[in-house]
Image (tube, rainbow, N blue to C red):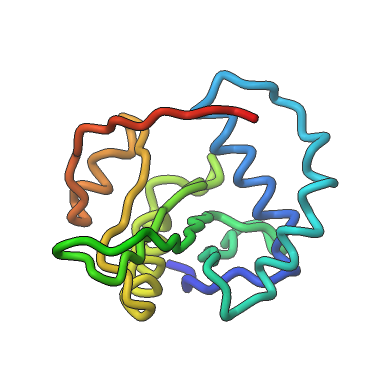
């Protein structure tokens, strides 16, 4: 298997391509990629900030040089501490995507494991994610447990 590595600014276009693969497979939304151009400068800056609260781990595509096979991104968010988590650092895993031609090779597991280690190194004690039914077994095998979710959302 190809080595997992931290994404760099030069990966931004491929990161957006794989994010679109995830969006298209999970959400019934506009398939347009017109937003990619507007998103690229911010994504490149985030990928270049090695000390920030955002990161992405990737695997290079073994059959297509210059392409990525897998992407897993994550952020750290501060919430006021509580019992069992006095520092209040919460990790969130998102944009887990594998190129359709590179699936079932363990890339998502390897990238997610690298992201979980990144969280540990930064003192994160809780990690959250939203899983599709197809991906849920992977996350459960990594130790995630289903929880009731009272999440409400407002789009501004």
Q: Is residue 13 above or below residue 26?
A: below
Residue 153 in the image: state x and y as whole percent: 47, 29
Q: Is residue 4 above or below residue 30?
A: below
For residue 88, which quarter of the picture? bottom left
For residue 80, which quarter of the picture? bottom left
Left/right of residue 81 with respect to residue 61 in the rendered view = left
Which is nearer the eye, 20 or 50? 50
Please report the residue visible at 56 percent of the width from the left and 19 percent of the height from the top: 28
Residue 40 in the image: state x and y as whole percent: 79, 54
Q: Quadrant of the N terminus?
A: bottom left
Please report the residue visible at 53 percent of the width from the left and 28 percent of the height from the top: 154
Residue 95 in the image: state x and y as whole percent: 51, 47
For residue 149, which quarter of the picture? top left
Please report the residue visible at 44 percent of the width from the left and 60 percent of the height from the top: 77
Most extreme residue toward the top is 28
Which is nearer the eye, 102 or 53? 53
Which is nearer the eye, 73 or 141? 73
Which is nearer the eye, 90 or 66? 90
Residue 93 in the image: state x and y as whole percent: 42, 53
Number of numbered discs present? Answer: 0
Q: Is residue 19 above or below residue 55?
A: above
Left/right of residue 126 with respect to residue 102 in the rendered view = left
Left/right of residue 88 with respect to residue 18 in the rendered view = left
Q: Quadrant of the C terminus?
A: top right
């Amino acid at each position: 298997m190809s080595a997992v590595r931290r994404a760099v600014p030069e990966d931004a276009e491929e990161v957006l391509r794989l994010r679109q693969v995830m969006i298209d497979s999970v959400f019934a939304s506009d398939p347009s990629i017109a937003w990619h151009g507007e998103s690229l400068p911010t994504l490149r800056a985030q990928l270049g900030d090695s000390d920030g609260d955002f990161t992405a781990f990737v695997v290079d595509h073994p059959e297509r040089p210059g392409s990525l096979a897998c992407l897993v991104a994550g952020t750290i968010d501060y919430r006021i501490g509580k019992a069992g988590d006095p520092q209040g650092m919460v990790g969130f895993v998102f944009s887990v995507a594998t190129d359709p031609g590179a699936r079932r090779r363990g890339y998502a597991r390897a990238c997610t494991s690298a992201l979980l280690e990144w969280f540990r190194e930064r003192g994160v004690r809780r990690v959250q994610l939203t899983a599709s039914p197809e991906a849920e077994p992977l996350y459960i095998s990594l130790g995630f447990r289903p929880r009731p979710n009272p999440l409400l959302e407002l789009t501004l």
